[in-house]
Image (spheres, helix red, strand yellow):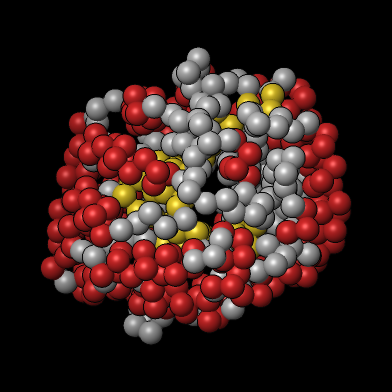
C-alpha cells in the first residue's frame, strides 16, 4: 500500500525535523519533543514522549548519555535511516494504520513480524527450541517478500529474523533490505557469521540491525553454544563497533547462567562493546527435547526483575526483560497483539515459543490468519492475567494455552517431534505454581 497524501506530508515534516536535529542535537531535542507532542494529536505516543523531558534536563542521566551516543558512535547515514524507518514508518505512520485495520477487521494487527528464514544453523545450542525444526526448512525469498508487502499494507514496518541461524542466508537478508528500504530489519543471530564483508553490506543498505546472542561471559556462553563461540561473538561486536553500526544483544537467562547475566560486569561489557540495547529472554521449555532444569527458580527470576530495573536507571543501554516487563506492554504481546512468528515451514504461530498453528502463509494471507480461531482466541484472552508478571499463556498460565489450542483445533508445528499440548502443560504447570506467589508478592509491592 502506497502512503496516503497525509502520511507523505507527515513523513516530509518529520524528515525536516531530523535534518534539523543533526545540526545540533543537544539544543534541538527538547524542541522536537514539544513538536512531537503537538503532532501526536490522539495521544497514542504520550507515554513514550513525556518521560524524555526529564531525561534531557539531566546531562548525567544514563538515558541522556545513550541518546547522545547515537551521534558519537553511529554512522550518520545509518542513524538517519534508523530514525526514518523506526520513528516515521514503524511508529508515526505504522501505529495509526494498524489501529485502522484493527477497527475495520476486529482482530489483532502486529507492530512487528518475526520470521524464520531457515531452520539451518551452524551451532547446536543446549535447550534451543529451534533445533527441533530440523535443518532443511526455508522460507523462499518470494514468500518473505510477499509477507513484507502484505504487512506494509496494514502498517507493519518492523521485521525480525530468527531461525535456525538467519545469517546462513546473508544474501537474501541484504536483498530484502534493498527491496524494502522503508522497513527496519533486525535479526536474532549467534553472531559467528558476522565478518568485515557483511558489515560493509550493512553499512550500504543501512536498515539492518543484529541482536547477537550471548549467554554471559566465556564459560557460560561456550557451555551452551560450543567452545570458541564467545571469542567469535566478541570479534563480531568489535567489527560492528568499528564500522559505527547499530547492534544489540539477545540474552537468554537460565538457571545456569543467571548470576553471570545479571551482573553489573556483564552489562558494562555490553556497553563497552558498543551494544545499544539488550533484550533479555526467559528460557522456555519448548519441544520434546527441552531441558526443564534450565528453567530459573523463582528467587533467580526475582534477581533479574530487580537487576534490569536497576540497570535501566544507571546504564547507557536500552534493556527490556520480556517476561518481567509485561506491565509496560499490557501483558502478552503475541498472537498479533504486537507481534507474531512465522516459522521456516510457513506456519503462522502466535509466538516464537508457541509451536502451534491453524494457518500457513502458503495457504492463508496474513489478514486471514489474524482472523482465524487461534489468533482470535489470543485477542479475546489478552491479557491472560491481571498480574503482568505472569503474562504468558504458556509459562505462567498454561491452562490458557491448552484451552486455546484445543478450542481452535491448532496443531503442533514441530516437524521433527510434534509436542502434545497436554505434555507441554505438564512441564509448565509446576513452574507456574512455583512462580505465582513470588510474582504476586512483587506485583503487590510495586502497585500499592
Residue 168 seen anywhere in this rendered image of the structure: yes
Which x, y percent locates residue 343? 53, 33
Question: Would you identify the image quadrant in which residue 222 lies?
Answer: bottom right
Which x, y percent locates residue 329? 57, 51
Image quadrant occupied by the C terminus:
bottom right
**What residue lies at 69% left-to-right and 24% top-to-bottom?**
411
Tally the numbered discs. 0
Which x, y percent locates residue 327? 62, 56
Image quadrant occupied by the N terminus:
top left
Furthest residue toward front: 227
Q: Could you say which is closer to the camera, residue 270 or residue 408?
A: 270
Furthest residue toward top: 363
Question: Would you identify the image quadrant in which residue 270 lies?
Answer: bottom left
User: Left of 275 or right of it: where is 203?
Assistant: left
**What residue lies at 24% left-to-right and 65% top-to-bottom?**
243
Question: Would you identify the image quadrant in which residue 70 lies?
Answer: bottom left
**What residue lies at 19% left-to-right and 40% top-to-bottom?**
9
Compared to residue 262, the image places residue 226 above or below, namely above
**What residue lies at 37% left-to-right and 34% top-to-bottom?**
155
Which x, y percent locates residue 266? 53, 76
Residue 6 seen anywhere in this rendered image of the structure: no
User: Left of 349 or right of it: where is 315?
Assistant: left
Q: Could you say which is closer to the camera, residue 281 or residue 368?
A: 281
Amino acid at each position: 500500500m502506497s502512503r496516503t497524501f497525509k502520511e507523505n506530508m507527515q513523513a516530509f515534516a518529520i524528515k525536516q525535523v531530523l535534518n534539523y536535529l543533526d545540526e545540533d542535537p543537544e539544543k534541538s531535542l527538547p524542541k522536537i519533543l514539544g513538536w512531537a507532542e503537538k503532532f501526536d494529536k490522539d495521544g497514542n505516543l504520550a507515554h513514550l514522549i513525556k518521560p524524555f523531558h526529564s531525561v534531557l534536563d539531566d546531562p548525567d542521566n544514563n538515558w541522556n548519555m545513550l541518546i547522545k551516543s547515537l551521534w558519537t558512535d553511529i554512522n550518520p547515514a545509518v542513524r538517519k535511516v534508523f530514525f526514518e524507518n523506526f520513528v516515521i514508518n514503524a511508529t508515526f505512520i505504522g501505529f495509526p494504520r494498524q489501529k485502522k485495520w484493527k477497527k475495520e477487521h476486529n482482530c489483532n494487527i502486529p507492530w512487528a513480524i518475526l520470521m524464520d528464514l531457515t531452520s539451518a544453523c551452524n551451532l547446536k545450542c543446549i535447550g534451543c527450541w529451534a533445533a527441533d525444526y530440523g535443518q532443511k526448512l526455508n522460507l523462499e525469498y518470494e514468500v518473505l517478500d510477499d509477507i513484507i508487502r502484505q504487512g506494509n499494507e496494514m502498517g507493519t514496518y518492523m521485521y525480525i529474523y530468527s531461525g535456525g541461524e538467519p545469517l546462513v542466508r546473508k544474501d537474501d537478508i541484504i536483498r530484502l533490505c534493498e527491496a524494502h528500504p522503508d522497513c527496519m530489519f533486525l535479526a536474532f543471530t549467534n553472531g559467528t557469521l558476522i565478518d568485515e564483508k557483511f558489515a560493509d553490506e550493512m553499512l550500504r543498505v543501512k536498515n539492518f540491525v543484529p541482536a547477537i546472542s550471548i549467554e554471559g561471559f566465556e564459560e557460560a556462553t561456550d557451555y551452551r553454544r560450543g567452545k570458541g563461540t564467545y571469542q567469535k561473538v566478541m570479534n563480531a561486536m568489535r567489527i560492528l563497533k568499528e564500522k559505527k553500526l547499530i547492534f544489540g544483544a539477545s540474552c537468554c537467562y537460565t538457571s545456569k547462567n543467571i548470576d553471570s547475566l545479571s551482573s553489573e560486569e556483564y552489562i558494562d561489557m555490553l556497553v563497552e562493546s558498543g551494544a545499544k540495547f539488550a533484550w533479555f529472554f526467559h528460557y522456555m521449555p519448548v519441544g520434546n527435547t527441552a531441558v526443564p532444569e534450565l528453567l530459573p527458580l523463582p528467587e533467580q527470576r526475582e534477581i533479574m526483575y530487580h537487576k534490569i530495573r536497576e540497570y535501566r536507571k544507571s546504564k547507557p543501554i536500552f534493556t527490556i526483560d520480556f517476561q518481567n516487563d509485561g506491565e509496560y506492554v499490557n501483558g502478552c504481546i503475541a498472537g498479533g497483539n504486537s507481534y507474531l512468528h512465522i516459522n521456516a515451514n510457513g506456519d503462522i504461530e502466535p509466538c516464537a515459543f508457541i509451536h502451534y498453528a491453524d494457518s500457513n502463509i502458503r495457504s492463508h494471507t496474513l489478514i486471514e490468519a489474524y482472523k482465524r480461531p487461534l489468533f482470535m482466541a489470543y485477542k479475546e484472552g489478552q491479557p491472560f492475567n491481571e498480574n503482568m508478571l505472569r503474562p504468558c499463556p504458556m509459562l505462567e498460565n498454561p491452562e490458557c494455552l491448552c484451552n486455546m489450542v484445543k478450542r481452535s483445533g491448532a496443531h503442533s508445528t514441530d516437524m521433527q517431534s510434534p509436542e502434545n499440548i497436554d505434555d507441554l502443560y505438564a512441564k509448565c504447570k509446576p513452574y507456574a505454581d512455583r512462580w505465582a506467589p513470588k510474582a504476586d508478592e512483587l506485583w503487590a509491592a510495586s502497585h500499592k
